Image (cartoon, rainbow, N blue to C red):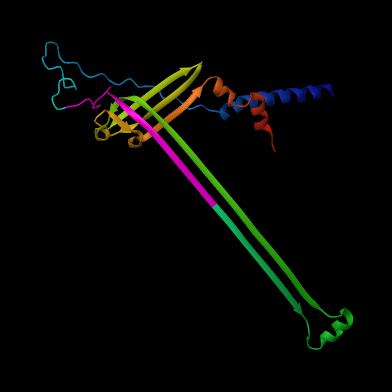
């Protein structure tokens, strides 16, 4: 009897440890993309007068990003709103009745044996359902990103990241995507709406982030509770 109790206790401990390890995956933080170091431009040969075209020695160029390692300012102004409503209502009523008045003379014998014979029935059903869902999101920020790759068609692959720490609370803002040089404004800025394959991550880590999550025991119980 004692061995069975020890086995049950060991099994419960093993289940709790397994649940704790699995519950860590319930709150996966967003990955912060790491910067890829672009290949440096080829330096001019020693003694050469022309050092290569850049925004400082070109008479017809401006300060907009146009090559590797150039910096462009991203104006993030994302706003999304979605909603969906659904309503369903159905009903059905049925009534049926039947009786035997004559059946080749056998109805008299049936009436003497069973009395009046009649069949009837009614049924009804109804269904009413309604549902509604809404979602709102808004993100406004400005962040500078670096051109890390120039595609064959001339588009830029950009990556940018910003870390702000206030009172031991870290706030991360990362952005990656593809932009067209033609969409860059005269002040070297571009709206986030013009970024293709855009990935914006705004998250945090610290005391506030820890307080937003339930305790580990609560997460374990919630994960293993079958009801």
Q: Residue at image x 87%, y 78%? A: 114
Report the front residue among 57 and 101.
57
Q: Quadrant of the C terminus?
A: top right
Q: Residue at image x 86%, y 83%? A: 111
Report the front residue among 182 and 224.
182
Q: Residue at image x 19%, y 16%? A: 43
Q: Residue at image x 10%, y 14%? A: 49
Report the front residue among 101 and 123.
123
Q: Quadrant of residue 176?
A: top left
Which residue lies most toward the right here? Answer: 112
The number of discs equals 0
Q: Is residue 41 shown above or below 152?
A: above
Tell me if 128 is positioned left or right of 146 in this view.
Answer: right
Q: Position of residue 130 (x, y in %)?
A: 59, 52
Tell me if 62 is positioned left or right of 177 in this view.
Answer: left
Stretch in magenta: 61-85
Q: Is residue 33 shown above or below 127?
A: above
Q: Is residue 173 shown above or below 43?
A: below
Which residue lies most toward the top here? Answer: 47
Q: Position of residue 40 (x, y in %)?
A: 26, 18
Q: Quadrant of the N terminus?
A: top right
Tell me if 185 is positioned left or right of 103 in this view.
Answer: left
In the image, residue 47 lies in the stretch drawn in magenta: no
Tell me if 214 is positioned left or right of 37 in this view.
Answer: right
In the image, residue 75 lies in the stretch drawn in magenta: yes
Q: Quadrant of residue 103?
A: bottom right
Overall secondary structure of the magenta stretch? Answer: strand
Q: Quadrant of residue 149?
A: top left
Report the front residue among 147 and 113.
147
Which residue lies most toward the bottom here? Answer: 105
Q: Position of residue 61 (x, y in %)?
A: 17, 27
């Amino acid at each position: 009897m004692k061995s069975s109790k020890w086995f049950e206790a060991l099994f419960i401990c093993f289940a709790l440890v397994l649940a704790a390890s699995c519950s860590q995956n319930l709150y996966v933080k967003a990955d912060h993309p790491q910067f890829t170091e672009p290949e440096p431009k080829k330096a001019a040969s020693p003694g050469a007068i022309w050092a290569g075209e850049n925004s400082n020695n070109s008479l017809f160029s401006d300060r907009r990003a146009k090559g590797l390692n150039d910096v462009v300012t991203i104006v993030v102004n994302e706003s999304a709103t979605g909603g969906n409503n659904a309503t369903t209502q159905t009903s059905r009523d049925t009534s049926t009745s039947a009786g035997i008045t004559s059946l080749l003379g056998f109805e008299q014998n049936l009436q003497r044996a069973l009395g009046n014979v009649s069949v009837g029935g009614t049924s009804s059903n109804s269904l009413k359902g309604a549902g509604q869902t809404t979602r709102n999101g808004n993100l406004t920020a400005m962040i500078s990103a670096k051109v890390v790759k120039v595609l064959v068609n001339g588009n830029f692959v950009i990556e940018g990241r910003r870390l702000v720490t206030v009172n031991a609370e870290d706030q991360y803002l990362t952005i990656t995507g593809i932009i067209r040089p033609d969409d860059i404004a005269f002040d070297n800025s571009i709206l986030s709406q013009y970024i293709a394959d855009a990935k914006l991550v705004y998250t945090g880590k610290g005391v506030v982030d820890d307080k937003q999550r339930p305790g580990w025991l609560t997460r374990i119980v919630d994960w293993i509770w079958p009801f």
